Every structure is written in C-alpha cells, then in structure tokens.
Image (cartoon, rainbow, N blue to C red):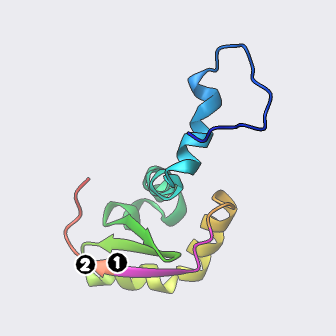
Amino acid sequence: MKFRVSEKRKNSTVTFEGILPDIIHEFQLEKSFTIEDLVTKWHTIVGDIISTHSKPDRIFKKILFIAADHSMYANEIMIAKDRILKVIHEEFPFQAIRDIKVEIKNIRW
C-alpha cells in the first residue's frame, strides 16, 4: 500500500472492506475479477446452450478471448459478437473490452 504522507493520520482501525479497493487497484487485479464475474454471468449473457459449450478465458490488450469446445459454437459467438459486446459494456462499464476472439479448445470448469 502507498504511504499517504500528505494526508492527516486517522487514529482508527481500518476495515478490510475499506482497503480492498486500494489493494485491487495497486496490484492491478481488476482484470482477474472481471473474468471471474464474466464466467459467473456468462449464461445470462449468451444463453444456456452456448454457455455450456464456451467460457470466457482471458482479457489481453482489451480483447476478450473466449474458449469454445466446437467450431459451431465459436461461429455462433462470432455472429452474436456485437450483441455480446453491448451486454458486456452494460454489465461492466469500467472495463473497456473492444473486441472478442474465440479459440477452439477443451473447456475446464
């Protein structure tokens, strides 16, 4: 945590809930929390059938990589790409995901 030299010292106990946002920001953990939230809400974003055959994998350079277990589901995701991006931007306005890429690979839940 950063030392706050210019701030007046508070003589009280700080709760973990109070410092958690600072820790997340300082260690740049926002992306990992976003992926976990995306995985949790994935079935509401794309629907039950596609969500059972795909999973958000990672975010790299503002590109969301999605793992799909078959090319048919990868194609369905690419067809619905604009709608998916719109829903993601509504759910996660602080995260600037600008594109979606789909990779065919085994999915581990």
Classify residue 11 as left or right of residue 59.
right
Q: Looking at numbered disc 1 in the image, what kind of residue is underneath it? A: Tyr
Q: Badge 2: few (under 14), some or many (20 or more) residues near its Cα, within 10 Å?
A: some
From what the image shows, is residue 1 above or below residue 104?
above
Q: Residue at x 38, y 86 (%)?
A: 75
Looking at the image, which is closer to me, 47 or 38?
38
Question: In the image, which residues are magenta?
Answer: 96-102
Q: Looking at numbered disc 2 in the image, what kind of residue is underneath it? A: His
From what the image shows, is residue 84 above or below residue 82?
above
Residue 78, horizontal then vertical, whole percent:
46, 84
Residue 29, horizontal then vertical, whole percent:
49, 52
33 falls in the magenta region: no
Residue 92, horizontal then vertical, whole percent:
63, 59
Task: Name the residue beneath numbered marker 2.
Answer: 70
User: Distance from label 1 to label 2 (Cα)?
Assistant: 6 Å
Classify residue 69 as left or right of residue 80.
left
Which image quarter holds the N terminus?
A: top right
Task: Name the residue beneath numbered marker 1.
Answer: 73
Q: Residue at x 56, y 72 (%)?
A: 84
From what the image shows, is residue 64 above or below residue 109?
below
In what element is the residue under mark 2?
Answer: loop
